[in-house]
Image: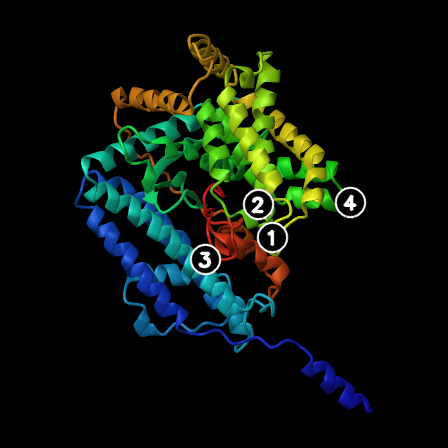
Amino acid sequence: MSPASNTNDSSSSQPKVVPLDPFWLKRWLSLRTSIEGVNEECSHNKTLSQFIPLLEALRSFGANHFYYFFLGFGGPVVNDEIDSDQIEAEYINQLDFFRDFLQQSPGDVPLKPEPQYPPNYVMRNIIDQISRDFDSIQRAIRQRQFANDLESLTLQLADKWGQSILEEITGKDANKPLKEKATVIAYFNSSPRINIIPYANVALIGIPYTANLADGRRDLLVIPHELGHYVFHFGKINGTPLEEAINKKLNDDNQGNKQNSIILNWTEEIFADVFGISASREIGTVTLALSMIADNLPSQIYLDRGIHPIDALRIKIYLKTIDKIEEELCLPPINASLPEVVLLSQQIRAYIEDKKNIIRTRGSIHADIAEDFTANLDKLVEEIFETILPFIDIDNWETVATGHSQQVNSQTSNEVKLEELYENFQTRLRSLLGEPDLTYEINICADRYEPNKGKMTEFPIGYDKWKRIFEADGWAIRGPEGRPTGDWEGRSFHL
């Protein structure tokens, strides 16, 4: 074989990249028009006008993200598409990063396409993520605009309870992970979720429609878990991002262990579980979680979804967290005063044991191997608990535990019904009704990725450099949902 033929073979083996579809520009302009339309509508309503900064932040960040990659992959912008000075400014703002290169190398593209993450995939994820956030924001707006009295009250209570949890861990003190005030905005959704957004100080939380009864708002107990995701992403310890500090510590302690590498994939969800239980000061959070495990498919009890702990082990996270709270406060075991928690956990353990030999979904962890995870899982829960302990007012748990113990002692049957635990939560929610209505203090965050764009001057810019900007710390590749094209949302308690 001649050298020439070798070269041709090598060239033909290179992965091909489908060229960028110019129609992405029309998709962005369509989406932008919708955002602007809702923005204009909100300007005529005093209550809804509070959402204008959030809509403007989404439009501005979305424009930066879209134009950087659309222009970077060689997308053309036709003059008649630019029908306003503001759109032109958004376009030119990102074009400036590439202007010198494009003048020197006409016909070349500033961003080097990556065959595994081709241009149209990148644009699809960016447009989808802007659309998801817009959908959630618009739901929050419309539901406040058209809600009946009961729905309006539920949304207010969700906002107030969530806000009270974040306020306890916000401040300038060194032990506070959130230095700037975050605003909680709830909206009804098919299942619990949180939008992790990089452009405003907002925790946008989807709450179940099933939480909308005056005497049945039990499912609002999912809120502390969702806020755990917000704290994981935006909290800091001694100036170091909380996510970075926890992952570094856990990775340093668990190098080279395949079993641990699986558990480490669950770190954020485990953090949200531990934070949710600790910060909520509600035993009902645990019992709700335990009961929700049982409504998943038996064939999926050992299914590893990659980011959520498997159901067979998740029960241990909840109970281990309670153990750590008892240990920290030198309390008598809360379980001793809450027999229904013990009974429920025993029932679920028996249920899981019974399903060990069932035909499992592909991707499941073998039952015997899962049991071996317990020691490492306990260690991870302990590490996370010790990390959050300095900024959680854990002492308030003593009142919770004492109150439940007194309830038990007053019962002739020596039992507290689960319904009574949930009624305690209902009472706590009702106490929020006397507090002033919240106003949404929304601050637009500076685009943290703009400085990195300006530093990249060696063209074409490779995937290893533009990847972090595209992903935006998980926003564009995963969104709030935690799946490759979805959000932190899932069936039942896979929050």
Q: Mark 2 or mark 1: which comes first in sequence?
A: 2
Rounded to the nearest angstrom, the CA distance separating label 4 from label 3 is: 37 Å
Secondary structure at badge 1 equals loop
Can residue 171 be spotted in the picture? no
Q: Is residue 282 above or below residue 294?
A: above
The residue beneath circle 3 is 65
CA gap between label 1 and label 3 equals: 41 Å
Whether 402 is drawn above or below 311: the answer is above
Spatial CA distance of label 2 from label 1 is 8 Å
Query: Foreground residue, 96 or 410?
Result: 410
Q: Earlier in the sequence, mark 3 or mark 2?
A: 3
Sequence-wise first label, 1 or 3:
3
Three-letter code, disc 3: His
Going 29% across and 47% down the picture, which residue do you hit? 139
Determine which residue is flagged by label 1.
360
Q: Could you tell me which residue is drawn at 70 percent across and 35 percent down?
A: 376
Q: Nearer the viewer, residue 394 or 353?
A: 353
Residue indicated by mark 2:
301
Q: Which residue is drawn at 43% across and 9% down?
A: 412
Q: Which of marks 1 and 4 is nearer the N terminus?
A: 4
The Cα–Cα distance between marks 3 and 2, rounded to whole angstroms, is 39 Å
* Mark pair 2, 4: CA separation: 27 Å
Amino acid at the residue labelled 1: Arg
Residue lying farthest bottom?
Answer: 2
Residue carrying label 4: 256
The residue lying toward the viewer, choosing from 376 and 131, is 376
Badge 1, how many Cα within 10 Å: few under 14, some, many 20+? some
